[in-house]
Amino acid sequence: MWAIDWAYGLNDYQVVPGWPDWLNSFDTYDVDAIANGRATEHECRLMLQSLFEDRFRLRVHWARKTVTAFALIPGRKGPRLRTGGRVIINGEVKQAASEIEAPDGWTMPRLANYLASVRGIGMPVLDKTGLTGVFGLALSYSIADDDGRPDIFSALPDQLGLRLQAIRAPVDMFVIDHVEHPTGN
């Protein structure tokens, strides 16, 4: 359920399999909520977590598990990044992911988080570049096998001077202990 992912800030790789099938269905629920004043993104996430705990009787815990992952590291010739500026991926200008993120450029942890969601990676990507600050970047990679662009594993070193190296690393995993169909009003 994407709403649980958003409420808890989850990446796909952090979810331990075993959710009830109905949670992955496309059932919809109407939620009417009113905040006292303007709520930040963080406050909205906490309110949604509370709703899941109250109405779905959701009980969860976090478990650290060592898994196969990728380390985002400098390439052999070093990174080719510019300080500040726009982030353009496959021709699309990327905006800040949240209100606390810098509007121009991404940090390396933000890039690593983005890469973890790229088709063909499907596992954690950890920032091991040692680079601090906010960087602008332009990255173009194939999202289909026949579009003529390089895959992400070739595009990163060629275009950004970064690469992915397979590692084993501890990752916090989200475990659902209990969940029920939601209660009514």
Image (spheres, rainbow, N blue to C red):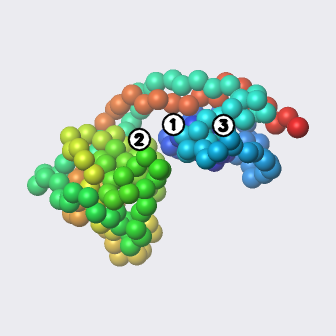
Residue 124 disc label: 2
Classify 10 Å Cα crowding around label 2: few (below 14), some (14-19), many (20 and above): many
Judging by the rendered image, the residue that carries numbered circle 1 is 14
Q: Quadrant of residue 154?
A: bottom left
* Residue toward you, 122 or 92: 92
Query: Are the two marked residues, 1 and 2, in contact with CB atoms closer than 8 angstroms?
Result: yes
**How far apart are the alpha carbons under marks 1 and 2?**
8 Å
Position of residue 29 measured from the top left corner of the image (x, y, whole percent): 80, 48
Question: Of marks 1 and 3, which one's residue comes earlier in the chain?
Answer: 1
For the point 46% across and 24% down, the residue is 64
Q: Quadrant of residue 48?
A: top right
* Residue toward you, 67 or 56: 56
For the point 88% across and 37% down, the residue is 185
**How far apart are the alpha carbons under marks 1 and 3?**
21 Å
* SS for dot 2: loop
The amino acid pointed to by label 3 is: Met
Query: Are the two marked residues, 1 and 3, in contact with CB atoms closer than 8 angstroms?
Result: no
Answer with left or right where residue 151 lies relative to residue 1: left
Question: Of marks 3 and 2, which one's residue comes earlier in the chain?
Answer: 3
Answer with left or right where residue 71 lies relative to residue 57: left
Question: Of marks 1 and 2, which one's residue comes earlier in the chain?
Answer: 1
Answer with left or right where residue 38 lies relative to residue 109: right
Judging by the rendered image, the residue that carries numbered circle 3 is 47
**How far apart are the alpha carbons under marks 3 and 2?**
27 Å
* SS for dot 3: helix
